[in-house]
Amino acid sequence: MLTKRIVPCLDIKNGRTVKGVNFVDLRDAGDPVELAEIYAQTGADELVFLDISATEERRRTLVDLVHRVAERVNIPFTVGGGISSVEDVDVLLQNGADKVSINSSAVKNPQLINDLSQKFGSQCVVVAIDAKMINGEWYVHLVGGKVPTDIKLFDWAVEVAERGAGEILFTSMNHDGTKNGFADEALAHLSEIVNIPIIASGGAGNMQHFTDTFINGKSDAALAASVFHFKEIDIIDLKKELRKNGVAVRL
C-alpha cells in the first residue's frame, strides 16, 4: 500500500514565508530556509516552495533561495512560481529542486506540460490548479487566484494528466486558510477521473481534516501551511493519529 504524504507548503514573498486567508491578508510566518530544515527533521514527507508573487511581478522564481533550501533538506522538494519555460525548470532542477509546479503558465501554454514531461520525466511535473466554486461549478483561477477563467476544474485536470503531468496540486480557493477542512468531494472526483496522484490543498485546520481528506477525499497527499508554520499541529503527532485511524503513513 502506498503511504499518504504530509506536505508543508512554504509560500514565499519578498524572501519570507507568508500565509493568508482565501489568498489574501498575508502575514509573516518565518524564514523559509529555517522552516524547511525543521520540517525535514520533524516528519514531513515532502516540501512545496511557492514564490507566490513571481507570476504577478513577471519575474523568475528566487533561484538562490531554492539553492539554500535544497542544501538543508533531505526530502523531495517542489518549487513553483514564475516558471514558464524548459529553461526555467532546468535551472531549478540544477539548483536542487526535485520537482516543479506550474500553474498559470500551463493554462496559457498547455504544450509546456508536454515539453517538461518529455524532457525531465512526468515525475518532475506537478500542475497546480487553483479553483473556486461559483454557482455550483468549479472554475480555474490564475495569477495566485486573482484572474478568473471560464475553464472548468475537472476538464482541465483530465487534460493536464493526458499531457503528462505527474501530479495535480488542487487548491480550493473557497477553503484556503479557513481551517474548515479540505474540499473532499471535489478531491474524490478528481481521483476518480485521473490516474495520477492528487495533492489536497486549502482548508486544513485540525488532524481530523487530514484523516477525512485521505479517506473521504481519496487524496494521495495533503498540503498545509499555517497549521504547521504556527505550530498548531505537530507532524509526528498528526502521523500517529492518522495511523490510528487506519491511514498508511511513514513515521
Image: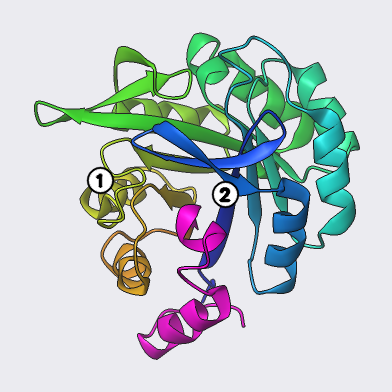
Q: Residue furthest left?
A: 135
Q: Left or right? Give the position of 190 relative to 64.
A: left
Question: Residue at the location (31% across, 55% down)?
Answer: 179
Q: Is residue 193 left or right of residue 91?
A: left
Residue 18 spot, x, y in % from top left? 56, 40
> For numbered disc 1, what is the local secondary structure?
helix
Residue that badge 2 annotates? 9
For the residues labelled 2 and 1, the Cα–Cα distance comes to 21 Å
Q: Is residue 161 visible?
A: no
Contact? badges 2 and 1 (CB < 8 Å): no
Q: Which residues are magenta?
A: 223-251
Q: Residue at x 53, y 62 (%)?
A: 228
Q: Amino acid at mark 1?
A: Ala
Q: Find residue 186 and name its label.
A: 1
Name the quadrant of the C terminus: bottom right
Q: Is residue 3 above or below residue 61?
A: below
- Quadrant location of residue 54? top right
**What x and y, as percent, mark residue 115?**
69, 20
SS assignment at label 2:
strand
Specify few, some or many for label 1: CA neighbours under 10 Å numbering under 14, 14-19, or 20 or more.
some
Does residue 233 appear to the left or right of 55 in the view shown? left
Say what amino acid the circle numbered 2 marks.
Answer: Cys
